[in-house]
Image (cartoon, rainbow, N blue to C red):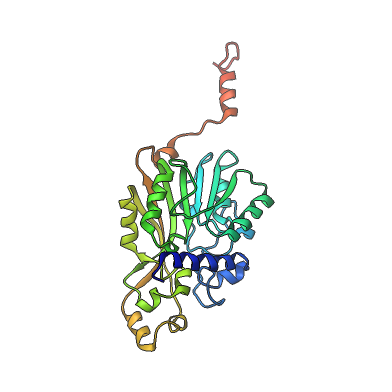
Amino acid sequence: MKNAEAMKTNVREKYAEIALQSKENNAASCCGVGTAGTYTIMADSYADLKGYNPDADLGLGCGLPTEFAHIFEGDTVIDLGSGAGNDCFVARAETGPEGKVIGIDFTPEMIRRARLNAEKLGFHNVEFRQGDIDDMPVSDNSADVMVSNCVLNLVPDKRKVFAEIHRVLRPGGHFSISDIVLVGELPDTLRESAELYAGCVSGAIQMDQYLELAREAGFQNITVQKQKPILIPDHILLEHLDQAGLQAFLASGTGIFSITVYAEKTGGPAVREKKEKRKVNMTELKTAIACCEPGSGCC
């Protein structure tokens, strides 16, 4: 998988298939790729999150980025690689009807499925746009928050994705992204596997490199919010390695991890300041004004 366009084509074809599969089949594989039951399940459960809709959950994630995203009422949120809309609907529960949520995905079948889910839910402030996340169909400085779940590892030019995230976020905006990263090197046969690339593994880069790309793009306060190991069963590794290669890989100390990363764009109020800023409740404001009118008896 050395050619960037070949990588994208492979991923698009695989995820078109995934869009038509059941959650059970997707969750039993690696990001929905491969025979059911062949990979350790990566996805965390969304069931306890407000706004969760089972019809939109294809079991493709490796974390819960919306859980850590510090989304406020009225925010504009963009989900990169939005799939059937799972994280978008969870984000919408936080933004409320006054906010806006945009999902971006480059697979037409996923866009169609997400739009149908939004229509069923009656959400008019959630929209889905077809496009690449390294060339987003979104204006500069237009989003308060970006989220993504197990998607950047599928893009060949990750530096360009972080540059796009920085372009689209408003000054002071932030992202919370779950992704797969490495500590140590994968054997060439694993890294070159088209199946493992579409399955979120061989497209992963070093954890330190991943965080450095965010710094190079201009982000600050970069924090790993959550980290967990991902284990690939030996019988799957043996589809790509011989027995000696498997033993060498297991002894190498290479680790595959799911991480959720937070970072802020400079130039505006940070999330900590937004947290402390009390939103005005119009009912309370009207009551306070009435209370202080002459003759009201409360002053």
Residue 47 in view: no
The quarter of the displayed image where residue 82 is located: bottom right
Q: Is residue 251 left or right of residue 167?
A: left
Pick the residue in front: 146 or 282.
146
Q: Position of residue 70 (x, y in %)?
A: 46, 46
The residue most toward the bottom is: 243
The quarter of the displayed image where residue 52 is located: bottom right
Q: Position of residue 236 (x, y in %)?
A: 46, 81
Q: Position of residue 144 (x, y in %)?
A: 46, 42
Q: In the rendered view, would you say 32 is above or below 134?
A: below
Q: Position of residue 136 (x, y in %)?
A: 47, 50
Badge count: 0
Residue 299 in view: yes
Name the image quarter holding the C terminus: top right
Which residue occupies 35% across, 59% down?
Answer: 210
Pick the residue in front: 15 or 258.
15
Name the image quarter holding the N terminus: bottom left
Which residue occupies 49% across, 66% down?
Answer: 9
Q: In the rendered view, would you say 136 is above or below 236?
A: above
